[in-house]
Image (spheres, rainbow, N blue to C red):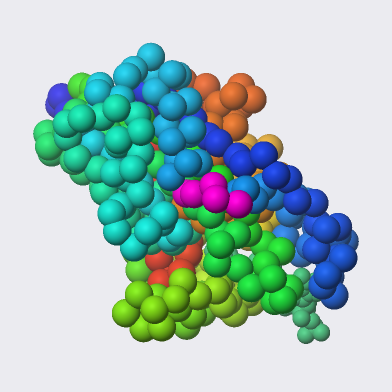
Amino acid sequence: MSVIRAVVKGYGHYLPERVVENAEFAETLDTSDEWIRSRTGIERRHFAAEGQKTSDLAIEAAKMALAKAGMQGNDLDAIVLATATPDQTFPSTATRVQHAIGLTHGFAFDIQAVCAGFIFALSNANAMITSGQAKTVMVIGAETFSRILDWEDRTTCVLFGDGAGAVILQAEPGEGTGSDRGILATDLNSDGRFNDLLYVDGGVSSTGTAGVVKMQGQEVFKHAVAKLAACGETALDKAGLHADDIDWIVPHQANLRIIKRTAQKVGVSMDRVVVTVQDHGNTSAASIPMALSVAAERGQIKQGDLLLLEAIGGGLTWGAAVLRW
Ligand code: UT7
């Protein structure tokens, strides 16, 4: 059976210049490099410069993805951008990227599913491509979480970083089997009963301020391991594939202990897991597309490899995608 698949044609990422090592936090907070490293796997993260906006990071990632695909901005039909830290309340950060890369037709919009945002955006783009609504779609995850951190709260501010990643998906015919390149299945979930486990204590219609991140870390940790493994297995099941078929898990990079436990539950060894958390920290919606781009640049991910992407974030929202690169 011939089907339409959304196939990756280009990838890119951008990290702001400023690198902040764990030791820097120990200068002002009761914390240590040892604690952060052993509890999270994080060694350093990048922070955007003063005045550098989420769209600025996204535009750089978008330009790299276009160059890798050998495309111009106007070759795209749409941009779907996942972020919880937009430049402004409106217009969307996606339309800023649209303008900057010279896309003068089509459409661009933002998606908000916090750390699971890239999976939600990817699934949305896949639906538009497979339904014939768009042929070529750029999917971006971009964040400046440094703008919503409480620098006096050691339980959250040491965890996050800034960055952006992008992939370009294009419609291609497939056989309708698990051997096809492209997105083979996605699985999206949310449960608003868990709003209070991870949230920002501000917003347009509540406080009129941007607010700062609040998290019940241990509770989120427990949900993360169980829910990530379950949605990963569901997505594999939908694609008619198994853990043995996976070449790489590309997980949301929040905590190395979560990454390890999830891989173990799914039944994939750590030498088949892409890990960037040590250098990026938790960059929310940007973490998976940046990990994809870094792994492709490292030569870890090769064309034809089967990838399982999985992420969880505030909401709670969580999801997975099975993608043959
Ligand atoms: O991306 C969205 C999804 N988010 C996540 O997946 C995050 C999930 N949660 C986690 O990654 C972990 O729960 C954390 C890294 C946030 C925390 O690790 P933990 O092993 O769950 O630590 P904990 O919260 O149980 O805290 C243990 C101790 C506490 O001290 P007491 O009460 O035992 O005296 C904390 O106050 O560690 C203390 N602590 C710190 N100590 C030094 C918390 N943060 C720090 C810190 N430095 N930065």
Residue positioned 15% across, 24% down in the render: 2
Residue positioned 60% across, 52% down in the render: 50
Q: Residue 283 appears at what percent x and percent y?
A: 56, 53
Answer left or right for 4 relative to 102: left
Q: Residue 5 appears at what percent x and percent y?
A: 25, 30
Q: Nearer the viewer, residue 141 or 324?
A: 141
Q: Is residue 232 above or below residue 271?
A: below
Q: Quadrant of the C terminus?
A: top left
Q: Residue 75 appears at what percent x and percent y?
A: 25, 21
The reply to whether the magenta stretch includes residue 123 is: no
Q: Residue furthest top?
A: 70
Q: Quadrant of the N terminus?
A: top left
Q: Residue 4 sits in which quadrant? A: top left
Q: Is residue 130 visible?
A: no
Magenta portion: prevailing SS class: loop
Question: What residue range appears in magenta?
Answer: 50-54
